[in-house]
Image: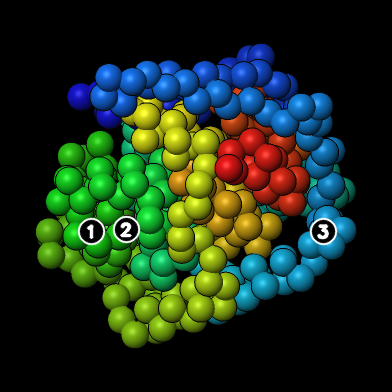
Amino acid sequence: GGATAGLAALAASFAPAGGAPKAGRRAAARCRASAGANTKTVRITAPEGWTPPEPKKFTVAEGNLGNVISAAVPLVLRLGTGALVNGYAPSLVDDDEPTKYSIVRFAGKRLAEASALGPRPALPIEVFEYEGSPYCRKVREACACLDLDVVYRPCPSGENYWRPMAKAEGAATFPYMKDPNTGASMCESDDIVEHLFRNYGPTAGSGLSADADAKALGVPFMLRRGGITNLTCYAAALARPKGLKCRPSRASEAASAGEPIEPIVLWTYESSPFTKAVREALTEMAIPHAVRYCPRGSVSKRDELLAKTGTFQVPYLEDPNTGVAMFESAAMVDYLEKTYSL
């Protein structure tokens, strides 16, 4: 119904198009909604005079080093899971396509990257979750490995719109996933991971039985059922216990009034230490967001972001509620706080 139509519209907005907004464009959005007999208007605007910074590759913002280092601890504990597309395979090829993304070019050669994936879903996967959960992390890593586009509905403790919605649909725990491409919905992180690999992984369509295990489905070792996965996911969560509780925001106000804001679009990969603080802010302020995962080996999306902005760097944020588009994670957190925090 309406939810699927909304996902279709969001998926259509991902399609490359001429005239895409460049970093810095500003606009204002008004979210009109009804709550009982009352009508409430929540106005979302970028901070007055806001100017996004220029992208600076491999540079940590002043005063942000400690934050980035602590955000890198989960990356180490999880052995970089989510940094590479499933089946990542680099190779040197002739550099006869200068517009394509490559991290290395020399002597007429460039580094090409390949992957082992299944069919691409027509609509984004929907996941109700929160940043600080070890089980939610497992699902996010799987989505990154499979190079998926995912709409996240933040459900930290105390959140009063997405969380009750999931519960009303029968969700007993988080994460809770809805796949509009198959009609499936489920909780339990291991089940979700295996569903995603069964439908979008390297063995999809190969005729495997419905009870094929994670190994047969091509699930990476660090995402399979078992002690090492859960142990390291818990350790990663404890290393940086943020993104657990909801705090007041304009996004929550708009949702409570009956009309949530449009999902912010975030280009990133799950293990990026620069993205961690951005995701924490999005979760704590219950800001819905669509993640366009582009880990190493995500050829088409890295090419797309390069064509859109003239450079490739993650995270990259696009806010359809204000028109702002920007690089630089520390500035993103500042922008989100000034735009959405109450």
Mark toward the start of the polypeptide (3 vs 1): 3
Left or right relative to 93: residue 263: left
Q: Name the residue beneath numbered marker 1.
A: 187
Spatial distance from mark 3 to mark 2, Cα to Cα? 31 Å
Q: Is residue 180 in view from this perspective?
A: yes
Q: Which residue corresponds to the image point at 38% horizontal and 59% vertical from the top-left?
A: 157
Q: Position of residue 56 (x, y in %)?
A: 84, 47
Disc 2 element? loop
Q: Position of residue 127 (x, y in %)?
A: 34, 48
Residue 216 horizontal/vertical position (percent): 26, 67
Amino acid type for the residue under numbered disc 2:
Pro
Q: Is residue 187 above or below residue 21?
A: below
In the rendered image of this protein, does residue 64 appear above or below residue 206? below
Which of the 4 image quarters holds residue 189? bottom left
Q: Are marks 3 and 2 in contact (CB under 8 Å)?
A: no
Q: Which quadrant, please, contains the N terminus? A: top left
Q: Which residue is mark 3?
A: 60
Outermost residue toward the top?
Answer: 19
Label 2: how many Cα within 10 Å (few below 14, some 14–19, many 20+): many
User: Is residue 97 rendered to the left or right of residue 217?
Assistant: right
Residue name at image x 41 percent, y 83 percent: 231
- Answer with left or right where residue 121 lies relative to residue 191: right
**Location of mark 2 (residue):** 175
Q: Are marks 2 and 1 in contact (CB under 8 Å)?
A: yes
Q: Quadrant of the C terminus?
A: top right
Residue contact between numbered discs 3 and 1, judged by CB atoms under 8 Å: no
